[in-house]
Image: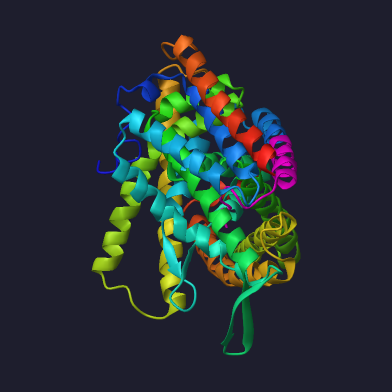
Amino acid sequence: MHIPDGFLNAATVATTCAVSAGGIGGAVRIVGKKLGEKQVPLMGILAAFIFAAQMLNFPVAGGTSGHVIGAALAAILLGPWAAVLIMSCVLIAQSLIFQDGGLLALGANIFNMGIVASFSAYYIYKLVTWLAGANRRGTLIGGFVAAWFSVFLASIFCAIELALSGSSPFGVVLPAMAGVHALIGIGEGLITGAVLGLVLATRADLLQLQRT
Amino acid sequence: MKHSFLDQYSEGNSLIHRLDPRTKLITTLCFILVVVLTPVSQWQAFALYFVLVATLIIISRVPVLYVLKRSLVIIPFVVMIAIFIPFFKEGEVAGSYNIWLWQLTVTHSGIQVLLNILAKAWLSILSLILLTAATRFSQLLRGMEQLRLPRVMVMIMSFMYRYIFVLVDEVMRMKQARDSRNLGGGRLRQIRTVGNMVGTLFIRSYERGERVYAAMMARGFDGQTRTLGNPVFGQRDFFFAMTLGLILVLAIVLNLWYL
């Protein structure tokens, strides 16, 4: 889902960069107030964790494989603003070091995989755990649903940006992106659920983190 | 540690290596901007950009083969997003195929747009590879900080860069352990295994983070980082930026002229 340079037109680049810059600015302010700079080493290592976790591929269908984005996990464990900050750092480093995603497209990529994915995951998780009860089952189901939606919504925004830029017609890119990512989302959901289950079993205190 | 490949050529001593990271960041951004905004039909312009990047790569003495290999790793991902384009642009039909249920038509203008986007993406990737191959990551971060990227992000990224190698080592060990135990079974089981691996990795990373923070506190960390020696924007940077800027302005003027 990392959009390279050359696909987006000037208007889309400008809009997404402005929105993402605003989002990062807000995240810096709120995270600075809530967590303080003392949490920076932890967030840095968690960014490295997401980087490393994206290296683990799982089979999707017909020989293709996907990897987790990690935004849902970060949002559920650390809250949406910290997740936005961590995902932005991961995406900037991926663009610069691995050329995975373009430099001008960074605004769009941060918007899709950082802002949209983190916030949708966080609030859907809240909603589902509220509906299903704040127990183990609720946490796992909430994690799965939130992660699936985070991937799905991010891919839809990605498709909209590509279509608005005239790179691909809307009627083609939307079903293609949404279809593929509906499958990848299942993997992301299952893995997020499994991670939450493991965290619940070994370090349940971490799930209370953003409530305090 | 086996992964020092990330910026293995960044210790060189060419003109490009010695530039201020700010100069490199901004010229790279301008270059990509000009490339991306070039109209579809300007093939001469793309040739000019290519010559420009190639010259800079040669000046930087980063091995050409390395740059090519790195750029070709990314191209499949670009093609994956671009592959639909030639089928859905209106215009003169270049070919028509029946594949299963679909009637696919490829148009000339569609192919042109596809090649154009691939060229743009490739040129941008080349310039980014040059940027990171000729600059140490810590320098790049310093440059970004001077260009007003929030300090928290710069610090997160510098910690991240420090620990990527540790965690990637960890992932590789886990992968090796998984593969040597003949992971089989259905897809669900495999995903469960990956889930457990990611979970273990998360807890290990988190606890490492706690230990690192405690160690830093014990050594008097107060939220500030102090470093030696800031890079200076000198004459060299000025001339480099002016030259590159002139070439890019020339390219824009030529594009408008021929339009």
Which of A77 and B159 lies nearest the eye of the viewer? B159
Residue farthest to the bottom, as pictured: B100
Question: Can you give x and y, in whole percent of width and height, for residue B206 in the image?
Answer: 46, 43
Question: Can you give x and y, in whole percent of width and height, for residue A4 in the image?
Answer: 56, 50
Residue B214 falls in which quadrant of the image?
top left
Q: Magenta: predominant secondary structure element?
A: helix
- In this picture, is A92 found above or below A136? above
How many marks on residues?
Answer: 0
Which of B156 and B86 lies nearest the eye of the viewer? B86
Residue A157 falls in which quadrant of the image?
bottom right
**Residue B104 in view of the camera:** yes
- In this picture, is A77 found above or below A20? below
Question: Can you give x and y, in whole percent of width and height, for residue B199 in the image?
Answer: 45, 56
B256 left or right of A54 in image: right
Q: Please report the residue visible at 28 percent of the width from the left and 54 percent of the height from the top.
A: B173
Is A44 inside the magenta-drawn segment? no
Q: Please report the residue visible at 71 percent of the width from the left and 69 percent of the height from the top.
A: B90
| Quadrant position of the N terminus of chain A in the picture | bottom right
> Magenta segment, which residues?
A1-23
Which of A184 and A98 lies nearest the eye of the viewer? A98
B157 left or right of A123 in image: left
- In this picture, is B235 found above or below A65? above
Question: Can you give x and y, in whole percent of width and height, for residue B161 in the image?
Answer: 42, 36
| Quadrant position of the C terminus of chain A in the picture | top right
- Coloured how? rainbow
Is A8 inside the magenta-drawn segment? yes
